[in-house]
Amino acid sequence: MKKFLIPITLFVVIGALLAYGLRLNPRRIPSPLIGKPLPHFDLPVLQDPGKTVDNADLRGHVVLINLWASWCVSCREEHPLLVALAHQHVVPIIGVSYKDKPADALAELKVSGDPYTEDLLDANGQTAIDWGVYGVPETFVLDRNGIIRYKQIGPITPGAWRRTLLPLIHELQSQS
């Protein structure tokens, strides 16, 4: 009887851990970069690869940085909301095309609309790795000093925009 006690106990413990893990929200992965400066980047502009944008170009403004890809289904679901937000002129939206071919990214923007103040290209994904990106879409809110104040994993929804992102953006914009 004792020889069955160890496997049964292990089975119960593993089952309990699995049950706990299934209740966790995978979109609530804490980022160690919250409250820290956005890691250095220097990315080419999608429409003009000879021009680049880096951290210094974003300083002085509260910005939303959205990583996306033309091949990403969730990005396509999120895109109409970003286009609508861009028309409201609440915050500059910087788009970073992740591991995409420039022609594919440009074609997607032409068809779906271009909500971005700047369209950047992270062709090899190195910048996304430096930023701790798990996949696309992901969105960062930066304050005027380039500090990451929020990270949205997955598509922005209207509810997430109203409840979380918009109040945070207004708060950061009201700070001097």
Image: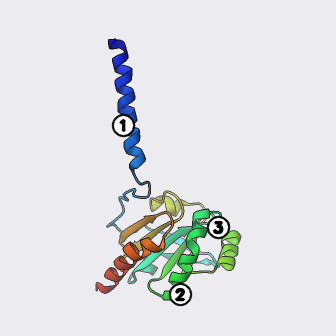
In the depicted view, which residue is nearer to us: 126 or 61?
A: 61
Q: Quadrant of the N terminus?
A: top left
Mark earlier in primary sequence (1, 3): 1
Single out the mark in the foreground, 1 or 3. 1
Horizontal side, residue 169 vs residue 76: left or right: left
Q: Quadrant of the C terminus?
A: bottom left
Where does residue 128 sit, x and y in percent of width and height?
Answer: 50, 62
Local crowd at mark 2 within 10 Å, few (<14), some, or many (≥20)? Answer: few
Where does residue 5 sit, x and y in percent of width and height?
Answer: 34, 18
Q: Amino acid at mark 3?
A: Ser
Q: Is residue 127 above or below residue 166?
A: above
Q: Amino acid at mark 2?
A: His
Mark yes or no: residue 110 visible: yes
Q: Is residue 122 above or below residue 15?
A: below
**Residue at 33% over, 66% down:** 36
**Mark 3 vs mark 2, CA separation in Å:** 21 Å
Horizontal side, residue 14 vs residue 118: left or right: left
Looking at the rendered structure, the secondary structure element under dot 2 is: helix
Mark earlier in primary sequence (1, 2): 1
**Residue at 39% over, 80% down:** 62
Q: Is residue 60 above or below residue 127?
A: below
Looking at the rendered structure, the secondary structure element under dot 1 is: helix
Q: What residue did someone put label 1 on? A: 16
**Residue at 57% over, 67% down:** 68
Q: What residue did someone put label 2 on? A: 87
Check residue 70 in the rendering and tell me which mark sits there, or answer none: 3
